[in-house]
Image (spheres, rainbow, N blue to C red):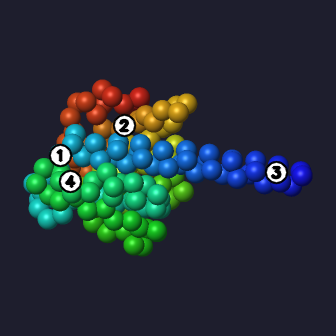
Amino acid sequence: MKRLLLSVFIILFITKFNYAQVQMSKAQAMFSYNFTKFFDWPQSEKQGDFVMGVLGSRSLASELEKVTAGKKNVTQPIVVKYFRNINEVEKCHVIFVDALKSGDISGIHSETGLNCLIITDSNTGINKGAAIQFVTEGDRLKYDFKSENALKHGLKFHSKVKEMARNNY
């Protein structure tokens, strides 16, 4: 009987954890897509597909594919690419770097190209070069923003990005 109760408890715990992960991935995907509306890339980056990359989080890549299906960033069709590791990363306009891959943030522009918005959920991501760092407060997703990291990569942004951020660096 103890084994049965323990098994039920473990299954319930795993189910709740997976549900929370999926919900967080959905929220991060929505935020990431919406950020594209408040940033402006150089003219040289406004042709071909608008590539949103995800390094390390398959669940976020799946959610981002759902959120962006059939959508465009102004005139560019949005394409989502999933990368398991830094060696697979290629040119992107936006890349989300999972916290477990945050050690790759500081060198990511050599793979993505200079004009790439880096978003992460690592609590040290801003210090490593990300412009946006997701933060969870209770059950709410928020973000910190470092304008210097966006500007040095040729990205302009709407003032709302700073205004709505939890912290600005």
**Residue placed most toward the observer, 155 or 71:** 71
**Residue placed most toward the observer, 65 or 169:** 65
Question: To which residue does mark 2 refer?
Answer: 145
Mark 1 vs mark 3: give the one in front.
3
What is the spatial separation of the Cα atoms under label 1 and label 3, in whole angstroms? 52 Å
What is the spatial separation of the Cα atoms under label 1 and label 2, in whole angstroms? 16 Å
Q: Which of marks 4 and 2 is nearer the N terminus?
A: 4
Mark 4 crowd level (few <14, some 14–19, many ≥20, 10 Å Cα): few
Question: To which residue does mark 3 refer?
Answer: 6
Q: Earlier in the sequence, mark 1 or mark 2?
A: 1
Q: Which of marks 4 and 1 is nearer the N terminus?
A: 1
Q: Is residue 113 visible?
A: no
Identified at 31% across, 69% down, the residue is 90
Mark 1 crowd level (few <14, some 14–19, many ≥20, 10 Å Cα): some
Identified at 89% across, 52% down, the residue is 1
What is the spatial separation of the Cα atoms under label 4 and label 3, in whole angstroms? 46 Å
What mark, if any, has residue 71 been given in the picture?
Answer: 4
Asked if residue 82 lies left or right of residue 113, the reply is right
